[in-house]
Amino acid sequence: MTTEQKRQLVLEAAEDAKAERINALDLRGKTLIADYFVVCSGNSDVHIRSIAEKIQDALREAGERALRVEGFREATWVLLDYGDVVVHVMREETRQHYGLEAFWQNAPIIESLREQASDESRKRAGSEAGRD
């Protein structure tokens, strides 16, 4: 499985689990840690675990196993390390506190399909309102 396929599978599984603010940070050429960080939010410990499980299940079905899983019991920040793709499932307040996106601010962000669709809907609504 290519890195891009793995990243896409993670994004789709996170969307299926109703994760919020799903972003993939493109770290290629910026660090040796990983090629992508996928960062998303959940609104409760149950939701965070559910998102992490959905991602693990999707990748397991594709023959991929996490090298490391951290924080599952506490469920304020679950880290799923797949080598080239590292997934961070966080409570929104934890995400704001640690600011991974700000730390990697020079990394291009690949938004989830749901976020892209939402942006397109807002743009269309704005252009339609301008025609009235």
Image (cartoon, grey):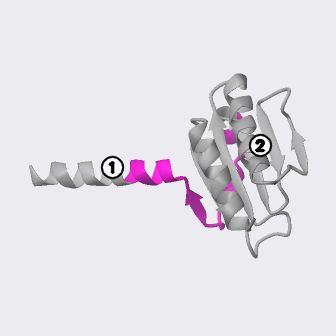
State the separation of the CA atoms marked 1 and 2.
30 Å
Mark 1 vs 2, N-terminal side: 2
Q: Residues within 10 Å of mark 2 (few under 14, many from 20)?
A: many
Find the residue positioned furthest to the left.
Answer: 132
Q: Position of residue 114 (x, y in %)?
A: 48, 48
Q: Position of residue 27 (x, y in %)?
A: 72, 67
Q: Is residue 74 left or right of residue 101?
A: right
Q: Position of residue 50 (x, y in %)?
A: 70, 30
Q: Is residue 97 visible?
A: no
Q: Residues within 10 Å of mark 1 (few under 14, many from 20)?
A: few
Q: Which is more toward the observer, 54 or 72?
A: 54
Numbered tag placed on residue 5 in the rendering = none
Q: At x 71% / y 46%, what residue is drawn?
A: 58
Q: Quarter-wise, where is residue 20 in the image?
A: top right
Circle 1/circle 2 CB separation < 8 Å: no
Q: At x 73% / y 24%, what residue is drawn?
A: 45
- Whether residue 96 is in magenta: the answer is yes
Q: Is residue 80 visible?
A: yes
- Callout 2, which amino acid? Gln
Q: Which residue is the site of mark 1?
A: 121
Question: From the viewer's perspective, is the residue at label 1 or at label 2 nearer?
Answer: 2
Secondary structure of the magenta portion, mostly? Answer: helix
Q: Position of residue 47 (x, y in %)?
A: 67, 27
Q: Which residue is the site of mark 2?
A: 56
Q: At x 15% / y 53%, what residue is drawn?
A: 130
SS label for mark 2: helix
